[in-house]
Amino acid sequence: MSSSDKSVGLIEKSGLDLRRSKSLFLIAIILISCIPLLSKVMYWGYDLEFHLFRIQGIADGLRHGQFPVRMQYSQGGGYGYPVSIMYGDWLLYIPALMHIAGLSLSLSYRFALILLNAASVVLTYYVCRRVFQSDLIGICGSVLWNLSLYRIMDIYKRAAVGEYVAMAFFPMVLFGLWSCLHPDRNGASRQGWIWCALGLTGIVTSHTLSIFMLGLVMIPILLYSLVFRSSVYIWVQFVKTAFLTFGLSLSFLVPFISYSRSANLAVYALPTDFKIKRMADHSVEPGRFLELFGAMFRPDAEASPSLGGIPISVGWAILTGVFIWAVVCFCFESRAGEDCLIDRGKKWETVPVLLSALIALFLASSLVPWHSKPLEKMISALSSVQFPWRFISLAVFFMIILGLCGLSMLYSQTDLKSVGRKAIVGITLLACLEGGYALGFFMENTNKFSPHSNQENTFVIESIMNGEYLPKGTNIFEVYPNKVVNHEPDVKMAELKNFSLNQGYATGSVKTHAEPGEVILPLFSYPNYAIDCQPSTNCSLSSTGGGTNFLVARFPENFDGKFDLNYRIPKLWRMADGVSLATWIMIIVWICIRRFRDSPVSRGIRIRHRR
């Protein structure tokens, strides 16, 4: 009998319920990760108010019959802001529906975040348990990932909703890719391509920058897969993954690409020199990756504007895991007449993971020659990430995988099982201490969140942050003089009566005389607005240009009638919605059929049918 069988036998004799104990451990991890959410007050985060406006915008759009919500009118004083087009927000419908049901914005946000933390903890545990065939390593992996300093900072200090939602799908991509590459191993899923596609879809529709970073950092893993593991089966799995991801994400990708090409947004007009300087200013000195017990606090006037109050350490628990992996791989040698500690093939399988982690750390660091002229084109493409320390999330993820590989190799050996168990428990406790300290320091030293009063005629800059998705050239000081929002149209060479504007839908009666007239509407000039006039004439839409970029409705001479103006979803977008919906339905039905076929009930039916 193996030592693991003996351990299981002893546990069973002791009367310990393994399932309940695992559930308690997972609940404990969830509670630790949610400590700041269990207070009456809400703690301040850099982007928190912006994302609360996004949730409010989705709720308002749904109330007015817009689904899916594309153009939001809660931001920018009601002038319209295409944040739902440029920023995936499927999971934000959960807090939006809670808000519609009667919860406050802050409570809706916190409940949704608790659900996300719980899902991330359980999913990470499930994936690690399947990959490494150990409940103990599954719990350790869930602690390392969900209580990692960068993830905690992303959730609470930065309140970077898109980024931390995307991070929740990283384990799903890992499990899908591993199952595709090693379908014969214990724990692998026969539907690895579905896992991978669902994970990639979650990332694409939450934070497009994360999918770009993931693809860049995973180059060594992909090269290894296609060169050393290449087969018809793997190519088929990759093709199926690509098609399924495309189909599931089409509802977001088509509007996003359409606006990226035609809307002439400010984000695409930023000077290259500015973007490169921003990357250089926010790069991390390599020594800071090794800090112990990172602290989160609100930076004062003298603190670094780029990294003040942000813990950018990898974390000593994760570093300890990587150290154990290195010791296991490179310090243990086979002895005469005895087996190696690890299989040589498994040892080399971890090298691409190491390279991916090193690439992520390098790209986050100040070692990158950001101002190099020969590399200017490459650096310019990389600068779309905005802040290089975003790569720390990927470095942490791949370093956790390395550490778990080392712990699994150690734990799987009979003679070293006790040492491996102690190492796993020690690293788990250290990760809890690091995460708990960061959360406690954050709560003690961060201001309580006080949202701006949502007054109808007051502009709140946090609603649009840096205004990346405003029309190019828009000057907010011209649009909102003294932060005052003007909801009245500017009428020229015409008479306007019975005007109303609500959620982008404008109506009114216009009368012109011998010359054409125009009505400058309090809406930003984005594509897809359309106007209908009665009687039907040559009414048209244009933009004021300059620093305001308001929408202008033009009417011909001697016009006397009504107009209706609204934001209309293009047919191509509706077709993309239909394709994505059909893909989701087909994959859900297919999974249900497969699970039924593998169920004991289905096997019993087939046996009776043969008889």
Image: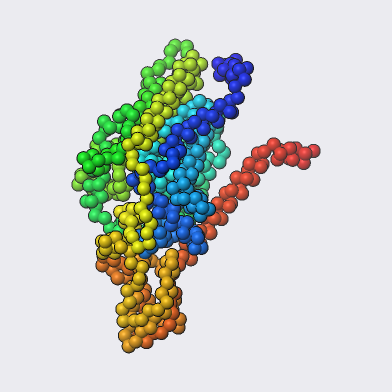
Location of residue 360 (image quadrant) = top left
Furthest residue in direction top, as rendered: 336
Where residue 425 appears, x then y in whole percent? 45, 22
Vertical position of residue 442 compared to residue 420: above or below: below
The one of 314 and 254 positioned closer to us in this rendering: 314
Q: In the picture, residue 153 is in which quadrant? A: top left
Taking 162 as reference, is 374 left or right? Answer: left
Rendering coords of residue 481 (x, y %): 26, 63
Residue at coordinates 26% horizontally, 42% vertically from top-left? 306
Seen at 28% across and 58% down, the residue is 269
Q: Is residue 36 visible?
A: yes
Quadrant in which the C terminus appears: top right
User: Residue at image x 53%, y 53%?
Assistant: 101
Q: Is residue 200 above or below residue 420?
A: below
The location of residue 158, given as percent across then percent down, is 35, 43
- Nearest the camera: 558 or 399? 558
Quarter that holds the N terminus: top right
Residue 374 visible in the current orientation:
no
Say if 296 sits above or below 546 in the image.
above
Residue 283 on image: x %, y %: 26, 40
**Residue that extends furthest to the right in the rendered view of this protein:** 611
Q: Residue at x 37, y 30 (%)?
A: 437
Q: How is the image coloured?
A: rainbow
